[in-house]
């Protein structure tokens, strides 16, 4: 693991009235090693530990989507923040599938926000 990198991770997923709260939480922890709380109709997880991103990194490598992940993440850079979306149902099944903010995931996507001193370096680490 690259210990020179620091990142603040925030993961959010809407809880729809038809969804099982536990399944939404499970979809997040299938991808990220974080504790998730339910706050005002939303599943929210926070971490400032790089270990929380290692599962995502491993899944990107195993699914052989490093190039696609790099493109999606780089397009989501705004200053020192990386923002991207994951398909909630795919995450529940233990798969990384990038999504748009709206439309692709009928129950709403998982929004991932990572604040990093050097976003490009973090993306390189996630996709190496």
Image (cartoon, grey):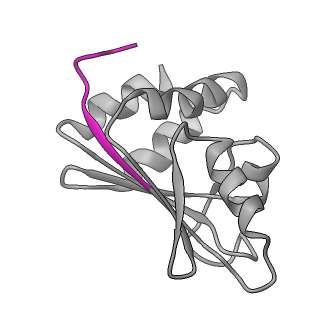
Q: Check residue 5 for magenta coloring.
A: yes
Q: Nearer the viewer, residue 5 or 29?
A: 29
Magenta stretch, main secondary structure, is: loop
Give me the residue at 28% from left, 28% from top.
121
**Residue situated in front as seen by the camera: 15 or 74:** 15
User: Total number of numbered labels?
Assistant: 0
Q: Looking at the picture, how far across and down is residue 125, in whole percent?
A: 39, 23
72 relative to 104, above or below: above
Using the image as rendered, state which of residue 54 and residue 70 is in the foreground.
54
User: Which residue occupies 70% across, 62% down?
Assistant: 24
Would you say 102 lies left or right of 104 here?
left
- Please tell me whether residue 56 belongs to the stretch shown in magenta: no
Q: Where's residue 59, x and y in %?
A: 65, 29
Screen quadrant of the N terminus: top left
The outermost residue toward the bottom is 17
Q: Residue at x 54, y 40 (%)?
A: 69
Q: Quadrant of residue 20?
A: bottom right
Q: Quadrant of residue 110?
A: bottom right
> In the image, residue 65 lies at what x, y percent?
64, 33
| Residue 108 picture quarter | bottom right
24 w.r.t. 103: above or below: above
Residue 40: % across, % down: 50, 82
Q: Residue at x 73, y 76 (%)?
A: 107
Compared across the picture, whether 81 is left or right of 20 comes to: left
State which region is magenta: 1-10
Horizontally, residue 82 falls left or right of residue 79, namely right
The image shows residue 46, relative to residue 122, as above or below, that is: below
């Amino acid at each position: 693991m690259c210990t020179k990198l620091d990142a603040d991770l925030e993961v959010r997923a809407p809880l729809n009235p038809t969804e099982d709260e536990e399944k939404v939480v499970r979809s997040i922890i299938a991808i990220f090693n974080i504790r998730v709380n339910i706050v005002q109709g939303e599943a929210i997880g926070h971490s400032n530990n790089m270990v929380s991103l290692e599962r995502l990194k491993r899944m990107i490598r195993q699914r052989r989507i490093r190039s696609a992940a790099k493109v999606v993440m780089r397009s989501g850079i705004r200053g020192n923040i990386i923002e991207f979306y994951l398909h909630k149902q795919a995450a529940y099944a233990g798969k990384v599938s990038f999504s748009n903010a709206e439309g692709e995931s009928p129950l709403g996507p998982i929004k991932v926000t990572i604040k990093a001193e050097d976003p490009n370096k973090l993306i390189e680490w996630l996709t190496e």
